Amino acid sequence: MAALNLNANLPVYIQWPDDAALTLIQRRQAYQPLFTTTRLHDQNQLWRGIARDIRNNHIFRPTRKQCREKWNALKSGYENLERLINRNPEGYPTRTPTLHDERFHQELSDEFWRVEPLVWAARRNKMDRRDIRV
């Protein structure tokens, strides 16, 4: 009788080295213009490139999915820590920050991922002007 693998559906957690996490942030920032103009479905290629860059520069070997998940965790951790620092005026649920939340808070403090592409801003401004006409 074959043994059952009870852990088969459990998520695998990996510990990202600090240098690889910092490279992830730097590469994600460098790719930001492409992320703002690439359809969500096609962003897999961008994550594949980021994973390749990390593998080429570190012993750590993440997949594109692991890069995307770590990026989302870093971003979420940054936002959580910002709420805690600002005494959470909106009353969102918070959690205890991780070491990476604290370690990379400064690197994420410019919130580069929230920058609206110039094309979108121009379109929005054009639409706003149309709404104002009487």
Image (cartoon, helix red, strand yellow):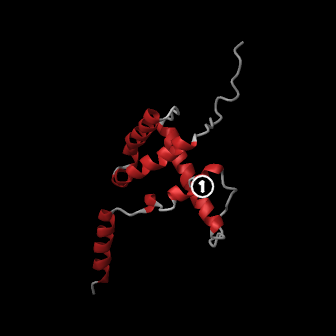
Is residue 121 or residue 111 the one in the foreground?
A: 111
Q: How many marks?
A: 1
What crowding class fits label 1: few (fewer than 14 Cα within 10 Å), some (14-19), or many (20 or more)?
A: many
- Which residue appears at 67% of the width and 62% of the height? 93
State left or right for residue 76 relative to residue 127: right
**Kind of element beneath mark 1:** helix
Is 15 above or below relative to 91? above
Q: Residue at x 39, y 45 (%)?
A: 43
Question: Is 60 left or right of 88, judged from the image as shown?
Answer: left
Residue 3 in the image: above or below residue 18:
above
Please state which of residues 4 and 116 is positioned toward the viewer in this rendering: 116
- Residue 68 place in picture, x, y as percent: 49, 44
Give the position of the C terminus as an image quadrant: bottom left
Give the position of the N terminus as an image quadrant.
top right
State the residue position of label 1: 77
Residue 24 place in picture, x, y as percent: 48, 45
**Furthest residue toward bottom:** 134
Residue at x-position 48% and y-position 49%: 25
Residue 50 position in % (x across, y down) = 42, 41
Left or right of residue 121: residue 89:
right
Question: Would residue 105 appear left or right of 96 to someone viewing this image?
Answer: left
